[in-house]
Image (cartoon, rainbow, N blue to C red):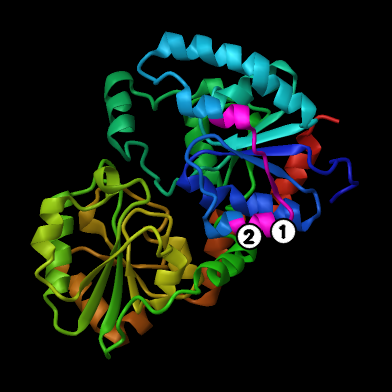
Amino acid sequence: MGDQRLKKGRVLFLIRVYNDLDHIVPIIWKMSALDAQPKFLFVGERFEDDYRINFIKKCGAVELNSPRFAFYAKFRPKSGFRRLTRLSDLFFELLVGRRLIQEKQISCVVTEWGGPEGKGMAPCILRPARALGIPIISVPHGYHTWVNNDFNDITSSSINATGDLPQMADRNRFSAYVVQSNNIKRYCVESGIDQSNIQVLGSARFCQEWSEINLQLCGKHKNFVNYDNKISILFFLGHWSYNVDRKRCVNLLETIAQKENVNLVIKGHTRGRVTGGLSEDEEKRLDKYPSIKYADERLHSPFLVKQADVVIVFGSSICFEALQQRVPVCKPNFLSRNITIFDNSGLVFEANTEEEVIRFVTLEELRRSTMPTEEVVENFFKEHIEGRDDSPNTEVLLKYTNLIESTSKT
Protein backbone atom coordinates (compact mmCIF):
# COMPACT_ATOMS: atom_id res chain seq x y z
CA MET A 1 0.00 0.00 0.00
CA GLY A 2 1.71 3.19 -1.17
CA ASP A 3 5.20 3.28 0.27
CA GLN A 4 4.21 1.01 3.16
CA ARG A 5 4.39 3.79 5.77
CA LEU A 6 1.31 2.32 7.38
CA LYS A 7 2.36 -0.48 9.70
CA LYS A 8 0.23 -3.57 10.04
CA GLY A 9 -2.49 -3.59 12.66
CA ARG A 10 -2.23 0.06 13.66
CA VAL A 11 -5.49 1.43 12.26
CA LEU A 12 -8.57 1.11 14.46
CA PHE A 13 -12.11 1.31 13.06
CA LEU A 14 -15.09 1.97 15.34
CA ILE A 15 -18.41 0.29 14.50
CA ARG A 16 -21.49 1.51 16.35
CA VAL A 17 -24.71 0.89 14.41
CA TYR A 18 -26.01 -1.05 11.43
CA ASN A 19 -25.29 1.67 8.89
CA ASP A 20 -21.59 1.38 9.73
CA LEU A 21 -21.62 -2.16 8.38
CA ASP A 22 -22.73 -0.80 5.01
CA HIS A 23 -20.36 2.14 4.75
CA ILE A 24 -17.30 1.37 6.92
CA VAL A 25 -16.81 -2.38 6.55
CA PRO A 26 -15.86 -2.07 2.83
CA ILE A 27 -12.90 0.12 3.85
CA ILE A 28 -11.84 -2.42 6.46
CA TRP A 29 -12.03 -5.14 3.82
CA LYS A 30 -9.85 -3.17 1.40
CA MET A 31 -7.20 -2.63 4.05
CA SER A 32 -7.36 -6.34 4.87
CA ALA A 33 -6.97 -7.22 1.19
CA LEU A 34 -3.86 -5.02 1.15
CA ASP A 35 -2.51 -6.95 4.15
CA ALA A 36 -2.69 -3.99 6.54
CA GLN A 37 -4.48 -6.13 9.16
CA PRO A 38 -6.79 -3.38 10.44
CA LYS A 39 -8.45 -3.62 13.82
CA PHE A 40 -12.08 -2.88 14.61
CA LEU A 41 -14.02 -2.38 17.83
CA PHE A 42 -17.77 -2.48 18.46
CA VAL A 43 -18.72 0.69 20.34
CA GLY A 44 -22.47 0.20 20.24
CA GLU A 45 -24.48 -2.75 19.07
CA ARG A 46 -22.48 -5.91 18.43
CA PHE A 47 -22.72 -7.55 15.02
CA GLU A 48 -20.58 -10.68 15.39
CA ASP A 49 -22.94 -12.76 13.25
CA ASP A 50 -23.25 -10.31 10.36
CA TYR A 51 -22.03 -11.75 7.06
CA ARG A 52 -19.79 -8.73 6.42
CA ILE A 53 -18.08 -9.02 9.78
CA ASN A 54 -17.41 -12.71 9.21
CA PHE A 55 -16.01 -11.87 5.78
CA ILE A 56 -13.54 -9.20 6.92
CA LYS A 57 -12.33 -11.47 9.72
CA LYS A 58 -11.55 -14.18 7.19
CA CYS A 59 -9.67 -11.59 5.15
CA GLY A 60 -7.42 -10.58 8.03
CA ALA A 61 -9.24 -7.87 10.00
CA VAL A 62 -8.87 -8.24 13.76
CA GLU A 63 -11.66 -7.59 16.25
CA LEU A 64 -10.46 -6.02 19.48
CA ASN A 65 -12.00 -7.92 22.38
CA SER A 66 -11.41 -6.02 25.60
CA PRO A 67 -13.15 -7.61 28.62
CA ARG A 68 -12.90 -4.30 30.48
CA PHE A 69 -14.46 -2.44 27.57
CA ALA A 70 -17.31 -4.95 27.35
CA PHE A 71 -17.88 -4.82 31.12
CA TYR A 72 -18.05 -1.04 31.17
CA ALA A 73 -20.38 -0.97 28.17
CA LYS A 74 -22.79 -3.17 30.11
CA PHE A 75 -22.76 -1.16 33.35
CA ARG A 76 -22.08 2.34 32.03
CA PRO A 77 -24.45 4.97 33.54
CA LYS A 78 -27.42 5.70 31.32
CA SER A 79 -27.29 8.75 29.07
CA GLY A 80 -30.05 10.39 31.15
CA PHE A 81 -27.48 10.92 33.89
CA ARG A 82 -25.25 13.03 31.69
CA ARG A 83 -22.90 14.40 34.35
CA LEU A 84 -22.42 11.01 36.00
CA THR A 85 -21.83 9.39 32.61
CA ARG A 86 -19.24 12.04 31.71
CA LEU A 87 -17.31 11.58 34.96
CA SER A 88 -17.49 7.81 34.67
CA ASP A 89 -16.27 7.98 31.07
CA LEU A 90 -13.31 10.16 32.02
CA PHE A 91 -12.22 7.64 34.60
CA PHE A 92 -12.64 4.77 32.13
CA GLU A 93 -10.83 6.64 29.35
CA LEU A 94 -7.75 7.11 31.52
CA LEU A 95 -7.67 3.55 32.83
CA VAL A 96 -8.75 1.60 29.75
CA GLY A 97 -9.25 3.66 26.58
CA ARG A 98 -5.87 5.38 26.67
CA ARG A 99 -4.06 2.17 27.60
CA LEU A 100 -5.79 0.22 24.83
CA ILE A 101 -4.66 2.74 22.22
CA GLN A 102 -1.10 2.72 23.51
CA GLU A 103 -0.81 -1.04 23.91
CA LYS A 104 -2.09 -1.67 20.38
CA GLN A 105 0.12 1.15 19.03
CA ILE A 106 -2.82 2.68 17.17
CA SER A 107 -1.69 5.27 14.62
CA CYS A 108 -5.12 6.30 13.28
CA VAL A 109 -8.77 5.95 14.35
CA VAL A 110 -11.56 5.82 11.78
CA THR A 111 -15.10 6.51 12.91
CA GLU A 112 -18.55 7.37 11.54
CA TRP A 113 -19.87 10.77 10.54
CA GLY A 114 -20.81 12.61 13.68
CA GLY A 115 -19.51 14.95 16.30
CA PRO A 116 -15.89 14.74 17.45
CA GLU A 117 -16.90 13.20 20.77
CA GLY A 118 -18.73 10.34 19.09
CA LYS A 119 -21.75 8.34 20.23
CA GLY A 120 -22.25 5.16 22.20
CA MET A 121 -18.93 3.99 23.62
CA ALA A 122 -16.95 5.83 20.95
CA PRO A 123 -16.03 8.77 23.27
CA CYS A 124 -14.00 6.37 25.39
CA ILE A 125 -11.69 5.89 22.40
CA LEU A 126 -11.95 9.19 20.55
CA ARG A 127 -11.18 11.48 23.48
CA PRO A 128 -8.00 9.70 24.64
CA ALA A 129 -6.90 9.25 21.01
CA ARG A 130 -7.21 12.99 20.42
CA ALA A 131 -5.36 13.72 23.67
CA LEU A 132 -2.54 11.45 22.49
CA GLY A 133 -2.32 13.25 19.16
CA ILE A 134 -3.68 10.28 17.19
CA PRO A 135 -5.34 11.36 13.90
CA ILE A 136 -9.08 10.69 13.72
CA ILE A 137 -10.83 10.40 10.36
CA SER A 138 -14.60 10.65 9.99
CA VAL A 139 -16.00 8.55 7.14
CA PRO A 140 -19.58 8.31 5.79
CA HIS A 141 -22.26 6.74 7.92
CA GLY A 142 -24.90 7.09 5.22
CA TYR A 143 -25.46 8.80 1.88
CA HIS A 144 -26.97 12.29 1.58
CA THR A 145 -29.12 12.25 -1.58
CA TRP A 146 -30.94 15.54 -1.08
CA VAL A 147 -30.47 18.78 -2.98
CA ASN A 148 -32.81 20.95 -0.88
CA ASN A 149 -31.47 21.79 2.58
CA ASP A 150 -34.80 21.55 4.41
CA PHE A 151 -35.04 17.80 3.79
CA ASN A 152 -36.16 16.76 7.28
CA ASP A 153 -37.71 18.07 10.50
CA ILE A 154 -34.37 19.02 12.06
CA THR A 155 -32.99 21.02 9.15
CA SER A 156 -36.36 22.68 8.49
CA SER A 157 -36.64 23.82 12.12
CA SER A 158 -33.13 25.26 12.07
CA ILE A 159 -33.65 27.10 8.79
CA ASN A 160 -36.97 28.52 9.99
CA ALA A 161 -35.46 29.65 13.30
CA THR A 162 -32.06 30.95 12.21
CA GLY A 163 -32.00 30.98 8.41
CA ASP A 164 -29.15 28.48 8.46
CA LEU A 165 -28.62 24.74 8.57
CA PRO A 166 -27.67 23.17 11.91
CA GLN A 167 -24.02 24.10 12.31
CA MET A 168 -21.36 21.39 12.58
CA ALA A 169 -18.19 23.47 12.94
CA ASP A 170 -17.07 21.18 15.77
CA ARG A 171 -16.39 18.52 13.13
CA ASN A 172 -13.40 20.54 12.02
CA ARG A 173 -11.67 18.83 14.94
CA PHE A 174 -11.42 15.68 12.82
CA SER A 175 -8.14 15.21 10.98
CA ALA A 176 -10.23 14.67 7.84
CA TYR A 177 -13.96 14.59 7.14
CA VAL A 178 -14.84 12.31 4.21
CA VAL A 179 -17.88 12.66 1.95
CA GLN A 180 -18.86 10.85 -1.24
CA SER A 181 -19.70 13.67 -3.65
CA ASN A 182 -19.50 17.40 -4.26
CA ASN A 183 -23.21 17.73 -3.50
CA ILE A 184 -22.57 16.39 0.00
CA LYS A 185 -19.49 18.60 0.34
CA ARG A 186 -21.64 21.61 -0.52
CA TYR A 187 -24.08 20.70 2.27
CA CYS A 188 -21.24 20.22 4.77
CA VAL A 189 -19.65 23.58 3.91
CA GLU A 190 -23.01 25.30 4.42
CA SER A 191 -23.17 23.50 7.79
CA GLY A 192 -19.94 25.10 8.95
CA ILE A 193 -17.32 22.47 8.10
CA ASP A 194 -14.12 23.91 6.65
CA GLN A 195 -13.96 22.86 3.01
CA SER A 196 -10.18 22.40 3.27
CA ASN A 197 -10.82 19.56 5.73
CA ILE A 198 -13.41 17.80 3.54
CA GLN A 199 -12.25 14.96 1.33
CA VAL A 200 -14.47 13.83 -1.57
CA LEU A 201 -13.64 10.14 -2.04
CA GLY A 202 -16.77 8.48 -3.41
CA SER A 203 -19.01 5.83 -1.88
CA ALA A 204 -17.37 2.83 -0.23
CA ARG A 205 -20.72 1.06 -0.06
CA PHE A 206 -21.86 1.50 -3.66
CA CYS A 207 -18.57 1.47 -5.56
CA GLN A 208 -18.36 -1.32 -8.12
CA GLU A 209 -15.53 -3.16 -6.38
CA TRP A 210 -17.48 -3.66 -3.14
CA SER A 211 -20.93 -3.95 -4.72
CA GLU A 212 -19.91 -7.07 -6.62
CA ILE A 213 -18.47 -8.67 -3.48
CA ASN A 214 -21.43 -7.66 -1.34
CA LEU A 215 -23.97 -9.11 -3.76
CA GLN A 216 -22.15 -12.43 -3.77
CA LEU A 217 -21.96 -12.48 0.03
CA CYS A 218 -25.60 -11.67 0.74
CA GLY A 219 -27.18 -13.41 -2.24
CA LYS A 220 -26.97 -16.96 -0.93
CA HIS A 221 -30.57 -17.21 0.26
CA LYS A 222 -33.38 -19.04 -1.43
CA ASN A 223 -35.67 -16.90 -3.55
CA PHE A 224 -37.79 -14.75 -1.27
CA VAL A 225 -40.41 -13.98 -3.91
CA ASN A 226 -42.60 -16.68 -5.43
CA TYR A 227 -42.04 -16.29 -9.16
CA ASP A 228 -45.45 -17.38 -10.40
CA ASN A 229 -45.31 -15.31 -13.59
CA LYS A 230 -46.19 -12.23 -11.58
CA ILE A 231 -44.34 -8.92 -11.53
CA SER A 232 -41.97 -8.68 -8.57
CA ILE A 233 -42.11 -5.17 -7.11
CA LEU A 234 -39.69 -4.10 -4.38
CA PHE A 235 -40.81 -1.03 -2.42
CA PHE A 236 -38.31 0.74 -0.14
CA LEU A 237 -39.86 2.83 2.59
CA GLY A 238 -38.21 6.12 3.50
CA HIS A 239 -37.53 7.93 6.75
CA TRP A 240 -40.92 9.33 7.79
CA SER A 241 -39.53 12.64 9.10
CA TYR A 242 -37.97 13.43 5.72
CA ASN A 243 -40.95 15.35 4.33
CA VAL A 244 -42.79 12.13 3.47
CA ASP A 245 -46.55 12.00 3.01
CA ARG A 246 -47.10 8.86 5.04
CA LYS A 247 -50.80 8.54 4.27
CA ARG A 248 -50.23 8.70 0.50
CA CYS A 249 -47.38 6.22 0.83
CA VAL A 250 -49.58 3.62 2.55
CA ASN A 251 -52.35 4.33 0.05
CA LEU A 252 -49.95 3.63 -2.80
CA LEU A 253 -48.87 0.36 -1.22
CA GLU A 254 -52.51 -0.70 -0.98
CA THR A 255 -53.21 0.31 -4.58
CA ILE A 256 -50.30 -1.77 -5.84
CA ALA A 257 -51.22 -4.73 -3.65
CA GLN A 258 -54.70 -4.83 -5.17
CA LYS A 259 -53.31 -5.69 -8.60
CA GLU A 260 -53.70 -9.36 -9.41
CA ASN A 261 -50.48 -9.83 -11.34
CA VAL A 262 -47.96 -8.53 -8.78
CA ASN A 263 -45.91 -9.65 -5.82
CA LEU A 264 -45.11 -6.68 -3.58
CA VAL A 265 -42.11 -6.85 -1.26
CA ILE A 266 -41.87 -4.07 1.33
CA LYS A 267 -38.50 -3.25 2.85
CA GLY A 268 -38.49 -0.90 5.84
CA HIS A 269 -35.87 1.69 6.68
CA THR A 270 -32.77 0.34 8.46
CA ARG A 271 -33.47 2.53 11.51
CA GLY A 272 -36.55 0.58 12.49
CA ARG A 273 -40.32 0.69 12.64
CA VAL A 274 -40.63 4.11 14.31
CA THR A 275 -38.47 6.09 11.89
CA GLY A 276 -39.01 4.19 8.67
CA GLY A 277 -41.27 1.19 9.06
CA LEU A 278 -44.97 0.54 9.01
CA SER A 279 -46.98 0.76 12.22
CA GLU A 280 -48.91 -2.23 13.47
CA ASP A 281 -52.15 -0.63 12.31
CA GLU A 282 -50.72 -0.02 8.85
CA GLU A 283 -49.54 -3.61 8.59
CA LYS A 284 -52.96 -4.87 9.66
CA ARG A 285 -54.52 -2.75 6.92
CA LEU A 286 -52.24 -4.32 4.33
CA ASP A 287 -52.23 -7.87 5.65
CA LYS A 288 -55.44 -8.73 3.83
CA TYR A 289 -53.55 -8.65 0.54
CA PRO A 290 -51.78 -11.96 -0.18
CA SER A 291 -49.50 -10.25 -2.69
CA ILE A 292 -47.57 -8.47 0.10
CA LYS A 293 -44.47 -9.77 1.81
CA TYR A 294 -42.30 -8.00 4.36
CA ALA A 295 -38.52 -8.29 4.15
CA ASP A 296 -36.85 -8.29 7.56
CA GLU A 297 -33.26 -7.42 8.45
CA ARG A 298 -32.04 -10.91 7.50
CA LEU A 299 -32.89 -10.23 3.87
CA HIS A 300 -30.43 -7.69 2.56
CA SER A 301 -31.23 -5.08 -0.06
CA PRO A 302 -28.81 -6.20 -2.83
CA PHE A 303 -30.28 -9.71 -2.67
CA LEU A 304 -33.83 -8.35 -2.84
CA VAL A 305 -33.00 -6.02 -5.74
CA LYS A 306 -31.57 -8.93 -7.69
CA GLN A 307 -34.94 -10.70 -7.54
CA ALA A 308 -37.02 -7.64 -8.43
CA ASP A 309 -38.52 -6.70 -11.79
CA VAL A 310 -38.92 -3.12 -10.64
CA VAL A 311 -37.82 -1.08 -7.63
CA ILE A 312 -39.82 1.76 -6.09
CA VAL A 313 -37.82 4.22 -4.01
CA PHE A 314 -38.30 7.92 -3.33
CA GLY A 315 -35.49 9.12 -1.06
CA SER A 316 -33.05 6.39 -0.20
CA SER A 317 -29.57 5.89 -1.60
CA ILE A 318 -30.52 2.23 -2.17
CA CYS A 319 -31.51 3.54 -5.59
CA PHE A 320 -27.82 3.18 -6.43
CA GLU A 321 -28.05 -0.57 -5.88
CA ALA A 322 -30.93 -0.88 -8.34
CA LEU A 323 -29.06 1.20 -10.90
CA GLN A 324 -25.93 -0.86 -10.33
CA GLN A 325 -27.88 -4.02 -11.12
CA ARG A 326 -29.74 -2.30 -13.99
CA VAL A 327 -33.17 -2.88 -12.45
CA PRO A 328 -35.84 -0.31 -13.52
CA VAL A 329 -36.53 2.30 -10.83
CA CYS A 330 -39.73 4.25 -10.20
CA LYS A 331 -39.57 7.37 -8.03
CA PRO A 332 -43.04 8.54 -6.87
CA ASN A 333 -42.39 12.27 -6.59
CA PHE A 334 -45.73 12.84 -4.89
CA LEU A 335 -44.68 10.94 -1.75
CA SER A 336 -42.11 13.52 -0.69
CA ARG A 337 -41.47 17.17 -1.47
CA ASN A 338 -37.72 16.66 -1.28
CA ILE A 339 -35.54 17.10 -4.34
CA THR A 340 -32.83 14.46 -4.76
CA ILE A 341 -29.85 13.89 -7.00
CA PHE A 342 -31.99 11.37 -8.91
CA ASP A 343 -34.53 13.99 -9.99
CA ASN A 344 -34.19 14.93 -13.67
CA SER A 345 -31.19 12.61 -13.93
CA GLY A 346 -32.59 10.45 -16.72
CA LEU A 347 -31.98 7.41 -14.52
CA VAL A 348 -35.37 6.80 -12.95
CA PHE A 349 -39.00 7.02 -13.99
CA GLU A 350 -40.50 9.95 -12.07
CA ALA A 351 -44.18 9.34 -11.39
CA ASN A 352 -46.46 12.18 -10.32
CA THR A 353 -49.61 10.14 -9.65
CA GLU A 354 -50.58 6.67 -8.48
CA GLU A 355 -51.81 5.91 -11.98
CA GLU A 356 -48.36 6.61 -13.42
CA VAL A 357 -46.77 4.31 -10.87
CA ILE A 358 -49.17 1.50 -11.75
CA ARG A 359 -48.54 1.94 -15.48
CA PHE A 360 -44.80 1.78 -15.00
CA VAL A 361 -44.70 -1.26 -12.74
CA THR A 362 -47.19 -3.27 -14.77
CA LEU A 363 -46.07 -2.47 -18.33
CA GLU A 364 -42.78 -4.16 -19.20
CA GLU A 365 -42.58 -2.25 -22.47
CA LEU A 366 -42.70 1.08 -20.61
CA ARG A 367 -40.04 -0.08 -18.15
CA ARG A 368 -37.73 -1.11 -20.99
CA SER A 369 -38.25 2.13 -22.88
CA THR A 370 -37.30 4.29 -19.90
CA MET A 371 -34.11 2.43 -18.95
CA PRO A 372 -31.11 4.81 -18.99
CA THR A 373 -28.22 4.35 -21.39
CA GLU A 374 -24.91 3.00 -20.13
CA GLU A 375 -23.29 6.39 -20.74
CA VAL A 376 -25.84 8.19 -18.56
CA VAL A 377 -25.36 5.68 -15.74
CA GLU A 378 -21.57 5.83 -15.95
CA ASN A 379 -21.47 9.63 -15.89
CA PHE A 380 -23.84 9.75 -12.92
CA PHE A 381 -21.81 7.17 -11.01
CA LYS A 382 -18.60 9.01 -11.80
CA GLU A 383 -19.97 12.08 -10.06
CA HIS A 384 -21.90 10.55 -7.17
CA ILE A 385 -20.22 7.18 -6.51
CA GLU A 386 -16.64 7.59 -7.65
CA GLY A 387 -16.40 11.14 -6.31
CA ARG A 388 -14.58 12.55 -9.30
CA ASP A 389 -15.14 14.87 -12.24
CA ASP A 390 -12.65 14.40 -15.04
CA SER A 391 -9.61 13.52 -12.95
CA PRO A 392 -7.90 10.16 -13.52
CA ASN A 393 -9.91 7.30 -12.11
CA THR A 394 -8.62 5.91 -8.84
CA GLU A 395 -10.50 3.05 -7.24
CA VAL A 396 -12.77 4.39 -4.52
CA LEU A 397 -11.64 2.07 -1.75
CA LEU A 398 -8.01 2.67 -2.61
CA LYS A 399 -8.60 6.40 -2.17
CA TYR A 400 -9.83 5.70 1.35
CA THR A 401 -6.83 3.57 2.24
CA ASN A 402 -4.47 6.16 0.74
CA LEU A 403 -6.02 8.87 2.91
CA ILE A 404 -5.72 6.73 6.03
CA GLU A 405 -2.10 5.97 5.17
CA SER A 406 -1.17 9.60 4.57
CA THR A 407 -2.98 10.78 7.73
CA SER A 408 -1.75 8.13 10.16
CA LYS A 409 0.71 9.04 12.86
CA THR A 410 4.13 7.63 12.07
Secondary structure beneath dot 1 equals loop
Q: Residue beneath label 1, please?
A: 59
Magenta part of the chain: 54-70
Counting every numbered tag in the picture gives 2
Q: Is residue 334 left or right of residue 105?
A: left
Q: Position of residue 27 (x, y in %)?
A: 66, 50
Q: Is residue 8 left or right of residue 394?
A: right
Amino acid type, residue under disc 2 in the picture: Phe
In the picture, the disc for residue 55 is 2
In the picture, the disc for residue 306 is none
Q: Is residue 273 part of the magenta span, yes or no?
A: no
Q: Residue at x 8, y 60 (%)?
A: 285
Q: Is residue 366 above or below residue 280?
A: below
- Other-residue count near label 2 (Cα within 10 Å), few / some / many at <14 / 14–19 / ≥20: some
Amino acid type, residue under disc 1 in the picture: Cys
Most foreground residue, 390 or 141: 141
Residue 173 is drawn in which quadrant? top right
Q: Residue at x 43, y 55 (%)?
A: 317
Q: Residue at x 53, y 21 (%)?
A: 169
Most foreground residue, 362 or 63: 63
